[in-house]
Structures are given as structure tokens and as C-alpha cells.
């Protein structure tokens, strides 16, 4: 989940206090390209979507692709809830409880560990399969687990906790930088993002190492099994034939990618990557892309060394005067908020700022701060079946993102 590095905590607090009294407003920058911070991007507000519901550290919101009236929320501690997508809904039903299995802040884990990802199979309506990623093990021997579950045979509205099948595991040397998102592409393959394994300065040099899952985006076929694995390798993955590289890798050089999303119109894969000392950034994940960590922090030099492949610059970045822990978001493709059409929304968990940008012809055309809400802690974004945009906040609420008239 988003992180606030300890080394910059005092700086971040003083920055926030200064901004509170100065009313400062910041616009992120695109490396090497001027940005029009015009009024074309509308200011937005957060409206409580389900006033009667409150969750414990919610960090995922979405739908299952089969029932348009149902949405889900993931709590970091290990529980998933389902409920009707109506403002007047009064109760959420427990869908799956992994709280006894998940390593998190409550049982000796790190603040960034827990149940971190959820993705419903594209054919969930027929096969009842969905996938999760969670932290497991102990503080002395950590691992990240991606697993498949299915619905209960007795009750098709809840999951069967005994149906778990582990798809893959990865050893985690430290408690931070889990960076996980799970999502299916239009190609039917599962994409998974993983952080660099934690600590600081990428001490194991995972970022530029194609022999590890850490610091990577993976792409696998969960509908097949091959070579002794619980999945198959898509043959068009970029490193299938490269000696010494893991064939599951789709892209690499990411520090702590917190939330990826596909643009439903263009197919672009967006990600927010949490920085270390000075910068936070947004990238477009491309096949075979190298995003530079830990030789770079965003577009800025961080360590000496030569990259494995040419480094792709971020789409946009901001410094730690503006925020300290990015939350990647979504491009709005709903119909209820026409003013928001085509805007990519992202936020900073530490400072509470929410930004938007428009991207066309290979560059950012407009970018602006759209909301400054310091108390809520935006941990994640999500959409319902109509592509309306929501935000999960650590005040326990789920909010709709709406344009201010």
C-alpha cells in the first residue's frame, strides 16, 4: 500500500503544516514537456457513496463483471465485503475472510502488508473464479501470495475459503514495498505488479534484475498450466527468449507500484509508482518497458550504473513538497460526469491532494490539482460496472468523485 518513508516524515509534516497556512496549490510536471495547467480540468468533490457503511482501512473497490448491481470492498486486514451499489444500502455482507491467514499490521506484519489485490476472472459469471494477493508468513520469513478462490457451491453469493489454490508465491525480504495490483487485460491474461522487496535504496538491486519477480509487472495465463506451474506463459511476453530473464515479466524497474488500471477506451495501462527521497511519478506500462528504478527516481538520477534496457521516463511526476506517497488511479470513462471524461485521476495518500491529467499523442496536454482533502487518506480508486469513479479512504468511507458544478 502507499508508504510514507521514515526519513522524510518530519519534512512531510512540516510541508503539510506550511501548506495549510499558505493555501499553496501545486501542479505536477511532465519531464521535459511544459504542461498547460488551465481551467479545462474541472475541480471535483468527494461525495459519500454509501453513508451507512464504514470499513476498516479499505484499499480496493470494484465489481465482478457479472452482476451490475453489486460492488465489493477489500479491507487491508483480510476481509472482502459485497453489497448493493445503492446510496441507501444499509449493510455489507462478508464475502471472504482471510484475516487469520493474512500477515498485516495487526499480527506482527508491516503497515504496508495485508490483503492488497483482488481481480475477478473475466468469466466469473460462469466459473466463479477470482484472484487475490496477500502478505503471508511471519515478520522473519515473509512472502507474497497470489491465489485463486471460487464461489461456495452452497451459496453463490459468497466465496469458499477452502477453495484456495496458490498461483504463485514470492519471497519478500522486508515488510514494505508490496506494491500489488491484480487485474485482467482485454487479452484475458492476469497482470500483477510487485514492489522491489522493501527497505530503502533497493538493497538487493531487484529493479534492474530480470531474474526476480520483485520490482516487476507480470503477465500470466491463469486458464492454463504448463511447465509445472499453476499458470502458463503467454508466448508474446517480451522476455520469453531472453537468457536469464523470467518469462512472466511484462515490464520492470518499478519501486513500489501502487495501483495499476487499464483505460477501457485506449487499453493504456497506467500505474502510480511510490518514490523514496524526492519524487512520486505516474508511468504508462508498456511491453518490455524499463522504468529505471533504482538507477532513477522518476526521471532523476538515483544510483550509478547501467540500465538493462533503455529507460522510459514517467508521464508525470511531483516532488515531496506536494506529497510523499502516490496512489495511482483511473481514466474516467463513465457517463454521469461528462466533464470528467478522459481525465486520469491520481492522488497522494500522505498530503491528500488529488490531481487529474489528460494525455494525448504521447504527452500530457493538461494537468492540475483538482482537490485538496488532507484528512481522508485516499488509499485507492475503483470503478463500478458503469465505469463511475470511486475513492477508498482511510476514514473508512467510499466516495464518489464528482465534478463541482
Image (cartoon, rainbow, N blue to C red):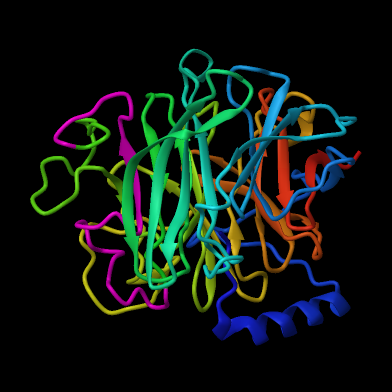
The one nearer the camera, 37 or 212, is 212
Seen from the viewer's position, the closer of residues 48 and 158 is 158
Question: Where is residue 333 drawn, in percent x and y?
Answer: 65, 29
Q: Which residues are magenta?
A: 199-228
Q: Which of the 4 quarters of the picture holds residue 388?
A: top right
Q: Residue 167 appears at what percent x and percent y? A: 33, 39
Q: Main secondary structure of the magenta part?
A: loop
Classify residue 95 by image quadrant: top right
Q: Is residue 79 above or below residue 121?
A: below
Residue 344 visible in the snapshot: no
Whether residue 98 can be seen here: yes
Q: Residue at x 16, y 40 (%)?
A: 240
The vertical placement of 44 against 68, above or below, is: below
Quick one: which residue is furthest to the top in this view? 126
- Whether residue 67 appears in magenta in the rendering, the answer is no
Left or right: 245 with respect to 340? left
Q: Nearer the viewer, residue 134 or 102?
A: 102
Q: Quadrant of residue 330?
A: top right
Residue 41, given in percent of the width and then of the height, sits at 75, 45
Residue 86, horizontal then vertical, whole percent: 83, 27
Q: Is residue 103 left or right of residue 286?
A: right
In percent of the image, x 72 and y 40: which residue is there? 390
Quarter in which the N terminus is drawn: bottom right
**In the image, residue 217 lies in the stretch drawn in magenta:** yes
Amino acid at each position: 500500500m502507499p508508504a510514507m518513508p521514515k526519513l522524510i516524515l518530519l519534512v512531510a509534516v512540516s510541508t503539510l503544516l506550511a501548506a495549510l497556512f499558505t493555501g499553496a496549490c501545486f501542479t505536477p510536471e511532465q519531464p521535459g514537456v511544459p504542461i498547460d495547467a488551465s481551467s479545462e480540468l474541472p475541480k471535483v468533490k468527494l461525495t459519500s457513496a454509501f453513508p451507512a457503511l464504514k470499513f476498516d482501512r479499505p484499499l480496493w473497490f470494484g465489481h465482478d463483471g457479472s452482476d451490475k448491481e453489486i460492488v465489493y470492498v477489500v479491507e487491508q486486514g483480510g476481509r472482502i465485503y459485497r453489497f448493493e451499489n445503492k446510496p441507501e444500502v444499509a449493510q455489507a455482507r462478508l464475502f471472504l475472510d482471510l484475516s487469520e491467514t493474512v500477515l498485516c499490521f495487526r499480527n506482527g506484519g508491516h503497515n504496508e502488508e495485508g490483503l492488497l489485490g483482488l481481480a475477478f476472472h473475466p468469466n466469473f459469471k460462469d466459473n466463479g473464479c477470482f484472484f487475490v494477493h496477500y502478505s503471508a508468513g511471519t515478520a522473519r520469513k515473509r512472502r507474497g501470495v497470489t491465489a485463486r478462490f471460487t464461489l461456495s457451491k452452497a451459496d453463490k453469493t459468497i466465496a469458499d475459503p477452502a477453495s484456495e489454490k496458490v498461483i504463485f508465491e514470492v519471497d519478500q525480504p522486508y515488510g514494505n514495498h508490496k506494491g500489488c495490483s491484480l487485474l485482467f487485460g482485454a487479452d484475458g491474461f492476469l497482470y500483477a505488479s510487485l514492489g522491489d522487496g522493501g527497505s530503502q535504496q533497493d538493497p538487493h538491486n531487484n529493479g534492474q534484475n530480470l531474474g526476480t519477480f520483485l520490482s516487476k509487472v507480470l503477465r500470466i495465463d491463469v486458464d492454463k498450466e504448463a511447465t509445472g506451474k499453476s499458470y502458463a506463459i503467454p508466448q508474446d511476453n517480451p522476455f520469453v527468449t531472453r537468457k536469464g530473464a523470467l518469462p512472466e515479466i511484462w515490464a520492470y524497474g518499478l519501486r513500489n507500484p501502487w495501483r495499476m488500471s487499464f483505460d477501457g477506451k485506449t487499453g493504456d495501462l497506467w500505474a502510480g509508482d511510490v518514490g523514496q527521497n524526492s519524487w512520486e511519478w505516474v508511468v504508462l506500462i508498456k511491453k518490455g518497458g524499463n522504468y529505471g528504478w533504482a538507477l532513477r527516481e522518476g526521471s532523476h538520477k538515483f544510483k550509478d550504473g547501467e540500465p538493462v534496457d533503455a529507460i522510459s521516463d514517467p508521464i508525470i511526476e511531483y516532488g515531496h513538497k506536494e506529497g510523499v506517497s502516490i496512489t495511482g488511479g483511473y481514466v474516467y470513462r463513465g457517463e454521469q460526469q461528462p466533464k470528467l471524461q478522459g481525465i486520469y485521476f491520481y492522488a497522494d495518500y500522505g498530503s491528500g491532494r488529488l490531481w487529474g491529467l489528460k494525455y494525448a499523442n504521447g504527452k500530457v496536454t493538461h494537468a492540475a490539482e483538482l482537490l485538496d482533502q488532507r484528512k481522508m487518506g485516499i488509499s485507492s480508486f475503483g470503478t463500478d460496472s458503469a465505469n463511475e469513479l470511486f475513492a477508498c479512504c482511510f476514514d473508512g468511507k467510499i466516495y464518489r468523485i464528482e465534478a463541482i458544478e
